[in-house]
Image (cartoon, rainbow, N blue to C red):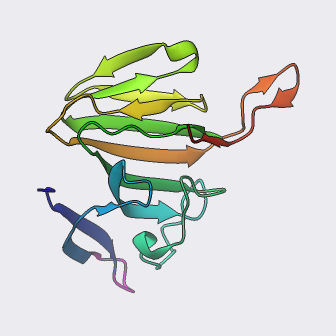
Amino acid sequence: MAIPIRRIVTGHTKEGKAIFTIDEEIETVVIPTGDAAMATLWTSASVPADCNDQIDGRMRDAGTTLKGGSVIRVVDMLPGASSPMHRSASIDYGIVMSGEIELELDDKVFKAVGIGGIIIQNGTIHKWRNPSPSKICRIIFVLTEAKPFEVNGVPLTDEMIHE
């Protein structure tokens, strides 16, 4: 059973007084590949973000990353599941909230990361795997667009490798 997520958003009145604008529970939704369930909590259209932007950032259309902006989402890696090997031109901060995840890089090099572990992805190609046969691994991700890493002056491209 997925754990609900409470999303609380603040904002301002026209006079500049701080207020709560959203207080709601949301749930993750299983993605088409079937390896994870996700919920986008917020996006910003630019970096630095604009506090005058009154759009509910959750409603902004975002892929894995948001060109020129940032995304925060909850990812529940389902038991025994793994993602495709993939890369995006972004800096990703991943915070493991529950369970354990294996992060695989090139040449099948991997590390296991448990509760409280924080992963900083610097635009590298990688794959996620939940080694548990019965427990969800919940990770909070903050993704910010970045310039891609270059090899001999050639930028590495975004990739999604389905095996």
Up-down relation of residue 53 to residue 155 (above or below): below
Residue at x-position 72% and y-position 38%: 147
Q: Position of residue 89 (x, y in %)?
A: 65, 41
- Give the magenta part as a residue range: 13-19
Residue 15 in magenta stretch: yes
Quarter holding residue 66: bottom right
Extreme-right residue of the structure: 153
As displayed, is residue 24 above or below residue 112? below
Q: Nearer the viewer, residue 57 or 160?
A: 160
Residue 22: in magenta span: no
Residue 88 visible in the snapshot: no
Q: Give the residue at x 20% y 42%.
A: 136
**Nearer to the camera, 125 or 47:** 125
Q: Residue 43, relative to residue 11: is it above or below?
A: above
- Looking at the rendered image, the quarter that the C terminus falls into is top right
Compared across the picture, whether 125 is left or right of 71 comes to right
Q: Is residue 148 above or below residue 43?
A: above
Q: Residue 3, position in %: x, y?
A: 13, 56
Q: Position of residue 111 (x, y in %)?
A: 37, 16
Quadrant placement of the N terminus: bottom left
Identify the residue shown where x is 56% and y is 53%.
65
Q: Nearer the viewer, residue 144 or 89?
A: 89
Magenta segment's dominant SS is loop
